[in-house]
Amino acid sequence: MPWTLGGGLLGDVTGLSSLVLLRPPAHRVSPRARVLWRIEALLGALPVLAAQAFWWLRDPASPRPIQVWLLVATIAIDTAYLVVMPIWRYRVHRWEVTDEAVYTQTGWLTQERRIAPITRIQTVDLTRGPVAGMLRLASVRVTTASSAGPLRIHGLDHAEAVALVERLTTLTIADPGDAT
């Protein structure tokens, strides 16, 4: 479904043409984001495996076939997730910034496209966790007055994220509006 601005799906947006059909955002995140998502998923799976190991060691009276089947199922599901999710997510995640708006497309099972007019931007943040830092990646969060929450672009090359924050800051400062 196309996005429209100015009396269309998003309502009236001052300063933009009466009908603008928008294509998916042009830019992908860094290819290293696949490694980041895989590591984060692996770190999320470790507590479940640790709990199963604890159960195995602390409850020797439990029927071992149940524990073995549960462990095999956990490993199979986690392995499939670790293989498929980063590839699929990389194909979906996109972003773009124009002089008028920030566009994002995110998700892997449930996909979401969002648009934030530059005039609505309140803050622009750059975040970088320890794993992302090791991979030279960062995330940009664009906060607006929207009740849907901020737009997030995860897995950008750090230098590209810094340049994006600088550009968005410049565009936001140049607009005389109050971002509400």
Image (cartoon, helix red, strand yellow):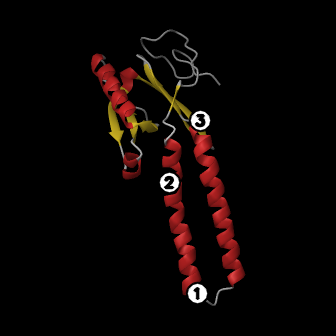
The amino acid beneath tag 2 is: Ile
- Badge 1 marks a residue whose secondary structure is loop
Earlier sequence position, callout 3 versus callout 2? 2
Earlier sequence position, callout 2 versus callout 1? 2
- Badge 2 marks a residue whose secondary structure is helix
Q: Residue at x 35, y 25 (%)?
A: 168
- Badge 3 marks a residue whose secondary structure is helix
CA distance for labels 2 and 1: 30 Å
Q: Quadrant of residue 52?
A: bottom right
Asked whether disc 2 touches disc 1, contact meaning CB atoms under 8 Å apart, the reply is: no
Q: Which residue is mark 3?
A: 92
Q: State left or right for residue 81 relative to residue 156.
A: right
Q: Residue at x 63, y 58 (%)?
A: 79
Q: Which residue is mark 2?
A: 39
Q: Residues within 10 Å of mark 1 (few under 14, many from 20)?
A: few
Q: Which circle marks residue 4 in the picture?
A: none
Q: Residue at x 62, y 41 (%)?
A: 88
Image location of residue 5, percent across then percent down: 52, 17
- Image quarter hosting the C terminus: top left
Q: Is residue 38 above or below residue 29?
A: below
The amino acid beneath tag 3 is: Val
Q: Residues within 10 Å of mark 3 (few under 14, many from 20)?
A: many
Earlier sequence position, callout 1 versus callout 3? 1
Q: Which residue is mark 1?
A: 59
Q: Residue 139, can we see it?
A: yes
The amino acid beneath tag 1 is: Asp
Most foreground residue, 85 or 24: 85
CA distance for labels 1 and 3: 44 Å
Asked whether disc 1 touches disc 3, contact meaning CB atoms under 8 Å apart, the reply is: no
Marks 3 and 2: which is nearer the front?
A: 2
Q: Residues within 10 Å of mark 2 (few under 14, many from 20)?
A: some
Q: Is residue 171 above or below residue 83?
A: above
